[in-house]
Image (cartoon, rainbow, N blue to C red):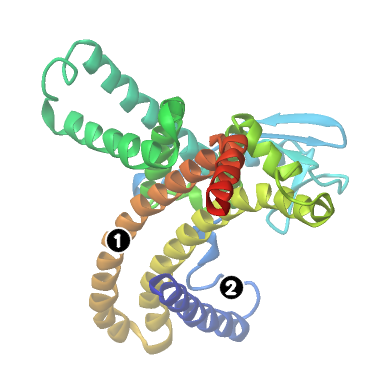
């Protein structure tokens, strides 16, 4: 119910911002920029925004008609005379569009930041434990204690809980790493100049694909029997059940990707829309109304920042939890022969 209400509020705010912008643009002409570009705050860019609004433009690497091109940035590609900008898109001078774009983007940079920060923290913690701090003695300092709280939580309450037997030990490192990486990528979106890369479907789809391949690669014989053979089921039923099970293999990672993407994107849009109402009110009613209303909108945004920080960790937890559930379902062994013998014995006892 809470998520539904949150998405409804996001939609309303988005329409409140979008409609005045559209009206203002129509009234003043097509060449005037809108008061606030909502989607421009969440889409991928060819530059990295720094503190204070400075921008560092990133390298462009792409293929056009079988030929690879490398440029320091977009402007360098335009200055070369080989490419030009058409409707905010880079195309070759002869009109041929880019067929494969491998450029460094703002979302990719923040994915790398999240991964590097995860590696740094885990290597730092490992060096502490190798020295005996936390292994032979109690953890020292807030950072190591916080690290151990999260690690023990992922190991005991997620991996051990949903992955049967000792098999959970094989997946603890992955689950903890993906939890940290997603948490950092989510929290980066709270920075005024930062980007929540998990609001990009390509990022969440990649993370879900990794979980998918780990799940299927480690799937037990029993797992694949339930996909193709269905022990104890009439062969005629396999015509219906097999396609459903195969489809189910892909709907699970699809749900992982969409859930994380939709929640992080809606949160980012909500914050941009609420702050954007200051400029919208100023543009429509004048500076006095815009300035006086800003107290309320900024206060509401501050509360939403606290909520969004909680949601950032919550979504990382949900992704990790569902990954553990899917992996646990795939590696579990059901021992059908033993179950069948027990069923026969029980039926015999009943008859006797």
Q: Is residue 25 left or right of residue 77?
A: left
Residue 124, placed above or below residue 171: above
Which x, y percent locates residue 273?
Answer: 43, 71
Q: Among all residues in the image, which is located at the extreme bottom?
A: 285
Identify the secondary structure beneath mark 2. loop
Identify the secondary structure beneath mark 1. helix
Front residue (pair 23, 225):
225
Spatial CA span between label 2 and label 1: 31 Å
Query: Neighbour class for label 1 at 10 Å: few (<14), some, many (≥20)?
Result: some
Q: Which mark is residue 233?
A: none
Which x, y percent locates residue 338?
Answer: 57, 35
Q: Among all residues in the image, which is located at the extreme top?
A: 131
Which x, y percent locates residue 11?
Answer: 50, 77
| Mark in front: 2 vs 1 | 1
Would you say residue 256 is visible in this rendering? yes
Q: Which residue is mark 2?
A: 32
Q: Is residue 100 left or right of residue 206?
A: right
Front residue (pair 177, 240):
240
Residue drawn at x 31%, y 55% as measured from the top left? 309
Residue drawn at x 43%, y 46% as measured from the top left? 321
Front residue (pair 21, 199):
199
Front residue (pair 176, 352):
352
Is there CB contact under 8 Å for labels 2 and 1?
no
Would you say residue 44 is visible in this rendering? no
Who comes first in sequence, dot 2 or dot 1?
A: 2
Q: Quadrant of residue 83?
A: top right
Q: Quadrant of residue 10?
A: bottom left
Query: Neighbour class for label 2 at 10 Å: few (<14), some, many (≥20)?
Result: few
Q: Which mark is residue 305?
A: 1
Which x, y percent locates residue 56?
Answer: 48, 39
Q: Quadrant of the N terminus?
A: bottom left
């Amino acid at each position: 119910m809470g998520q539904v209400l949150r998405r409804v509020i996001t939609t309303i705010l988005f329409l409140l911002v979008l409609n005045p912008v559209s009206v203002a643009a129509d009234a003043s002409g097509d060449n005037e920029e809108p008061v606030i570009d909502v989607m421009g705050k969440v889409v991928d860019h060819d530059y990295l925004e720094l503190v204070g609004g400075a921008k560092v433009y990133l390298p462009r690497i792409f293929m056009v008609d079988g030929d690879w091109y490398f440029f320091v940035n977009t402007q360098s590609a335009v200055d070369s005379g080989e490419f030009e900008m058409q409707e905010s898109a880079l195309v070759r001078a002869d009109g041929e569009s880019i067929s494969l774009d491998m450029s460094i983007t703002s979302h990719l940079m923040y994915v790398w930041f999240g991964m590097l920060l995860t590696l740094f923290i885990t290597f730092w913690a490992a060096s502490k434990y190798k020295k005996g701090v936390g292994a032979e003695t109690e953890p020292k300092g807030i950072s190591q204690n916080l690290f151990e709280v999260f690690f023990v939580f992922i190991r005991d309450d997620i991996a051990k809980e949903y992955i049967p037997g000792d098999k959970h030990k094989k997946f603890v490192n992955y689950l903890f790493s993906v939890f940290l990486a997603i948490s950092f990528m989510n929290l980066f979106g709270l920075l005024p100049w930062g980007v929540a890369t998990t609001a990009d479907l390509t990022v969440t789809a990649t993370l879900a694909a990794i979980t998918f391949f780990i799940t299927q690669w480690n799937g037990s014989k029993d797992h694949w029997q339930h996909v193709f053979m269905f022990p104890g089921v009439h062969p005629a039923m396999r015509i219906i059940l097999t396609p459903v099970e195969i489809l189910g293999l892909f709907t699970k990672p699809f749900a992982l990707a969409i859930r994380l993407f939709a929640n992080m994107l809606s949160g980012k849009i909500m914050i941009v829309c609420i702050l954007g109402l200051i400029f919208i009110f100023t543009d429509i009613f004048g500076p006095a109304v815009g300035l006086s209303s800003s107290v309320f909108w900024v206060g509401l945004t501050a509360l939403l920042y606290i909520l969004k920080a909680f949601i950032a960790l919550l979504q990382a937890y949900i992704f990790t939890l569902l990954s553990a559930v899917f992996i646990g379902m795939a590696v579990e062994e059901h021992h059908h022969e033993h179950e069948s013998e027990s069923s026969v014995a029980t039926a015999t006892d009943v008859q006797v």
